[in-house]
Amino acid sequence: MEMLFDAVSWVLILVGSVFLVVGGIGVVRLPDVFTRMHGAGIIDTMGACAILIGLMVQAWFNIVTIKLVLIVVFIMFTSPTTTHALARAALGGGARPQVRESPEGADVGEGESPSKT
Amino acid sequence: MMFAIAAVATLVTMVLTIYRAIKGPTVYDRILAVNAFGTLTVVLIAVYGFLSGRPEFLDLALVYALINFIGTIAVSKYVEYSHMGRPSGGDELGDI
């Protein structure tokens, strides 16, 4: 039984590490700020929460588990809030999502057109 | 062993996000990268606590998550409105 818990926590920690690196590559490689928010969301939800749930399985029923549950719940609440506020600030500040072509042909941003840098 | 792998992955991702925070063309890229960096710091503190056998560091991780959220919201509101408090004009700009 102990070995089963160890295996589950190791799988969760490995999956979380892989998703952390994938989200980091997404933050570097994606073209504009709105798609980079997608990479940051992968880091927040899949990566951090998988690693913290893996640690939670590792420290089975402790005060440590309660603290880890608090951290995970807090991250799950604050990550969409932060992304929403930041996307709203970016739209208000003049950044537009990069689109390949528009149906009407005009009045679309070309991506990365900031008013303040 | 697994904790070391998680710590190394966290450090690699920290390098990637700090690259975006330095290079990022707009200020929003920098805010996004700093927010992701704060989340990675929370993960790194928790993993290091398990790695060194002293999980009491989790209080620091919890407080760091709180400060990271408040700081990101404050900075994005400051960048959007150029000040912290009153609406800058119009009636519907009062709160986010």
Image (spheres, coloured by chain):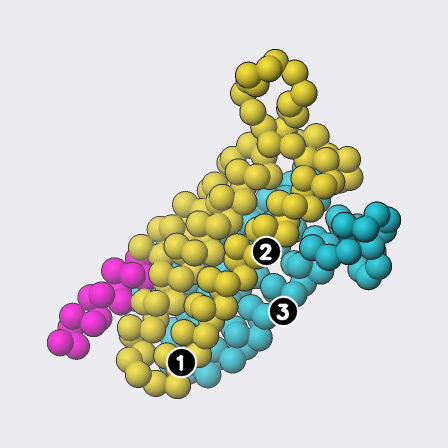
Chain colours: A yellow, B cyan
Q: Which residue is mark 1?
A: A66
Q: Residues within 10 Å of mark 1 (few under 14, many from 20)?
A: few
Q: Is residue A4 magenta?
A: yes
In which chain is the residue bearing label 1?
A
Q: Position of residue A54 (x, y in %)?
A: 32, 67
Disc number at residue B67? 3
Q: Nearer the viewer, residue A84 or B64?
A: A84
In which chain is the residue bearing label 2?
A
Which sits earlier in the primary sequence, circle 1 or circle 2? 1
Q: What amino acid type should be assigned to the residue bearing mark 1?
A: Ile
**Residue shown at 37%/63% (left/top)?**
A51
Q: Which residue is mark 2?
A: A82
* Same chain letter for marks 2 and 3: no
Q: Is residue A12 magenta?
A: yes
**Magenta part of the protein: which range?**
A1-14
> How many angstroms separate mark 1 from mark 3 (CA)?
20 Å
Q: Residues at badges 1 and 2 in contact (C-beta under 8 Å)? A: no
> How many angstroms separate mark 2 from mark 3 (CA)?
12 Å
